[in-house]
C-alpha cells in the first residue's frame, strides 16, 4: 500500500474510497469523447481540480511518464493514476473502465457495419463520415506538428520519416527505431537540438521494492498478454486468422509511440495491402466509427480485427468469429500498455529525469508527424479519388490515380467538414454527426 500513501501525501491530495473511485472511472469511460487531448483534460479536471485526488505536479509527472511508453497515452494515464491511488487493483480498474464502454460500443457499430451494408441510410452515413475523417486527420497533423516540431532537427526527422514511409515503403517499426536511436545519441551532447531540457526539478524518491514489483508485473503481464494467442494457436492452428490478429496487433502495441494516429497508416496499409483483411475505404469507415465512440481512438483496431475474423470465420459462424476477433484485438492492444505501466511505474521519477530517454521520445514524436502526413495523403487519395493503385519503380513506391476521377460529392463534403472544423470550430462529435447526416441526404437524393 506504499503507492497509496505516496499519492495521498502529494500536495495534500486525498485518496478516495474504492467505491467512489470505481464510480468516477466508470463515468469517465462512458463520456470520454474527443480523442486523447479531450480525455486527458477530463481526467485532469476530475482527478486534480474537482476530486483533488492528486496534485498538479504529480499529474504532469504521470503524463510525462506515459508519453515515454508505446500505446494510447490516455489509457496509460488512466491506469497510472489508478495505480497511484489504489495500487494494482486501482490501475486495472481505471484502465479497464476507461476502455470497456467504448469497446462495447465499437463492437455494436462493427456488427451494424457488417450486417447493415447495402442500406441507403447506413451507406450514406458512412460516405459522409469519410469526409469528416479526412478533416480530423488533417487537424491532428497540424496539432501534433505544432507541439512536436520545435527545432530544425525535429522538422528534418519528420520530413525523413515521411519520405521513408511514403516513397520508400520503410516499415514503421524501423522508422521508430531509427528515430529513437537518433534522439538518444543527440541528447547525450546537444539536447537543445531536440528541445530537451538538460535538467529536471522536483523529483520524488523512488518507490521501495521497485525491482520486485517490476519483475512480478512483467511475468504476470506477459503471460496474460500472450495466453489468448497461444490458446488460439493450440486449438485452431498457427495459420488461423485469430492467431494472425493476435500476433499483428501485439507487434503494433510495441511500436505504437505517439498515439493512435501514429500507427494508423502502418496498420491501415498492413491490413489492406498485406493481410487483405479489408479495403482502404473500409479502413476509413473504421476510423470514422472510432471517432464517434468514447474511449481511446485506437479502438479502430477492434473494427479491423472484427472484419478480419468475420470474413474468415471457419470453424465459427461469421458473427461469433467477428466477436472473437474483436475480443482478441482489444486484448492484445490494451494489455501491453497496462504491462508497461505496472512494470515502469516504480521507476517513474528516474525515467522522467533521464534526458537520453526524453531525447528519444522527442525524436520519435517528430518522426510520428511525418508518419501522420503519410496517413493524411493516403486517406485523401482513397477518399477523394475512385481508384488508387500502388506502384513500385525500383526502390520508389508511388500511388497511381486518375486526377479526372475526382469524386465531386466526397470533395464537397470534405470542404464542408473543413469549414465546420477550422472556420466554425465545431467539436469532433458535431462534425462527424453533421457529415453523417449530410451523407445520408446526399445518398437519398442522388443515389
Image (cartoon, helix red, strand yellow):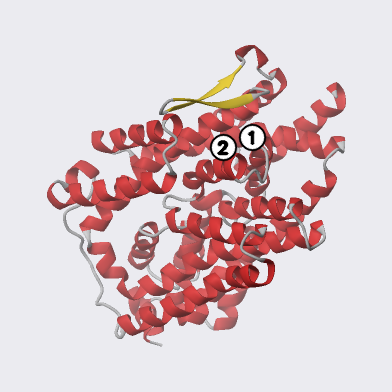
Residue 229 picture location, percent across and down: 59, 68
The residue depicted at 16 percent of the width and 54 percent of the height is: 198
Classed neighbour count for the residue bearing mark 1: other residues with Cα under 10 Å, few (<14), some (14–19), many (≥20): many
Left or right, residue 424 beside residue 432: left
Please identify the quarter of the rendering in which residue 19 is found.
bottom right
Relative to 60, residue 272 above or below: above
Name the residue nearer the viewer: 122 or 387: 387
Q: Which residue is mark 2?
A: 136
- The spot of residue 388 in percent (x, y) is 61, 25
Position of the C terminus, as image quadrant, is: top right
Depth check, front residue: 41 or 321: 321
Cβ–Cβ below 8 Å for labels 2 and 1?
yes
Q: Is residue 314 above or below residue 160?
A: below
- Residue 169 seen from this side: yes
Numbered marks: total: 2
Q: Secondary structure at mark 1?
A: helix
Residue 314 picture location, percent across and down: 77, 59
Q: Residues within 10 Å of mark 2 (few under 14, many from 20)?
A: many
From this view, report whether residue 314 is shown above or below residue 215.
above
Q: Residue at x 74, y 37 (%)?
A: 126
User: Residue 341 at what x, y percent from top left?
Assistant: 42, 69
Where residue 347 sits, quadrant-wise, is: bottom left
Q: Which residue is mark 1?
A: 132
Q: CA distance from mark 2 to mark 1?
A: 6 Å
Secondary structure beneath disc 2? helix
Looking at the image, residue 5 sits to the left or right of residue 276; the answer is left
Amino acid at each position: 500500500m506504499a503507492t497509496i500513501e505516496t499519492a495521498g501525501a502529494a500536495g495534500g491530495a486525498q485518496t478516495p474510497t474504492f467505491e467512489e473511485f470505481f464510480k468516477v472511472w466508470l463515468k469517465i469511460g462512458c463520456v470520454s469523447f474527443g480523442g486523447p487531448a479531450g480525455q486527458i483534460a477530463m481526467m485532469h479536471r476530475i482527478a486534480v481540480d474537482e476530486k483533488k485526488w492528486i496534485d498538479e505536479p504529480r499529474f504532469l509527472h504521470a503524463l510525462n511518464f506515459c508519453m515515454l511508453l508505446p500505446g494510447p497515452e490516455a489509457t496509460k494515464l488512466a491506469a497510472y493514476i489508478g495505480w497511484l491511488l489504489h495500487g494494482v487493483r486501482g490501475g486495472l480498474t481505471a484502465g479497464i473502465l476507461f476502455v470497456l464502454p467504448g469497446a462495447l460500443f465499437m463492437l455494436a457499430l462493427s456488427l451494424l457495419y457488417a450486417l447493415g451494408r447495402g442500406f441507403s441510410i447506413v451507406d450514406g452515413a458512412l460516405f459522409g463520415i469519410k469526409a469528416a475523417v479526412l478533416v480530423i486527420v488533417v487537424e491532428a497533423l497540424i496539432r501534433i506538428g505544432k507541439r512536436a516540431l520545435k527545432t530544425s532537427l525535429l522538422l528534418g526527422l519528420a520530413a525523413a520519416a515521411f519520405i521513408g514511409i511514403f516513397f520508400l515503403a520503410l516499415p514503421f517499426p524501423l522508422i521508430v527505431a531509427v528515430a529513437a536511436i537518433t534522439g538518444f545519441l543527440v541528447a547525450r551532447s546537444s539536447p537543445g537540438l531536440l528541445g530537451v531540457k538538460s535538467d529536471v526539478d522536483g523529483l520524488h524518491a523512488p518507490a521501495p521494492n521497485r525491482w520486485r514489483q517490476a519483475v512480478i508485473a512483467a511475468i504476470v503481464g506477459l503471460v496474460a498478454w500472450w495466453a489468448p494467442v497461444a490458446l488460439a494457436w493450440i486449438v485452431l492452428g498457427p495459420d488461423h486468422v485469430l492467431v494472425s490478429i493476435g500476433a499483428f496487433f501485439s507487434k503494433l502495441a510495441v511500436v505504437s509511440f505517439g498515439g493512435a494516429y501514429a500507427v494508423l497508416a502502418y496498420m491501415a496499409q498492413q491490413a489492406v495491402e498485406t493481410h487483405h483483411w479489408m479495403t482502404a475505404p473500409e479502413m476509413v469507415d473504421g476510423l470514422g466509427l472510432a471517432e464517434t465512440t468514447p474511449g481511446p481512438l485506437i479502438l479502430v483496431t477492434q473494427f479491423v480485427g472484427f472484419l478480419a475474423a468475420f470474413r474468415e470465420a471457419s470453424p465459427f459462424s461469421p458473427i461469433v468469429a467477428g466477436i472473437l476477433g474483436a475480443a482478441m484485438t482489444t486484448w492484445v492492444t490494451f494489455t501491453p500498455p497496462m504491462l508497461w505501466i505496472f512494470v515502469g511505474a516504480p521507476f517513474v521519477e528516474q525515467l522522467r529525469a533521464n534526458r537520453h530517454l526524453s531525447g528519444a521520445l522527442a525524436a520519435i514524436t517528430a518522426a510520428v508527424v511525418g508518419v501522420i502526413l503519410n496517413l493524411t495523403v493516403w486517406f485523401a487519395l482513397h477518399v477523394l479519388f475512385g481508384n488508387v493503385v500502388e506502384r513500385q519503380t525500383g526502390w520508389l513506391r508511388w500511388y497511381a490515380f486518375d486526377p479526372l476521377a475526382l469524386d465531386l460529392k466526397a470533395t464537397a463534403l470534405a470542404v464542408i467538414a473543413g469549414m465546420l472544423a477550422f472556420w466554425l470550430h465545431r467539436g469532433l462529435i458535431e462534425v462527424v454527426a453533421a457529415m453523417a447526416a449530410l451523407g445520408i441526404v446526399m445518398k437519398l437524393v442522388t443515389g
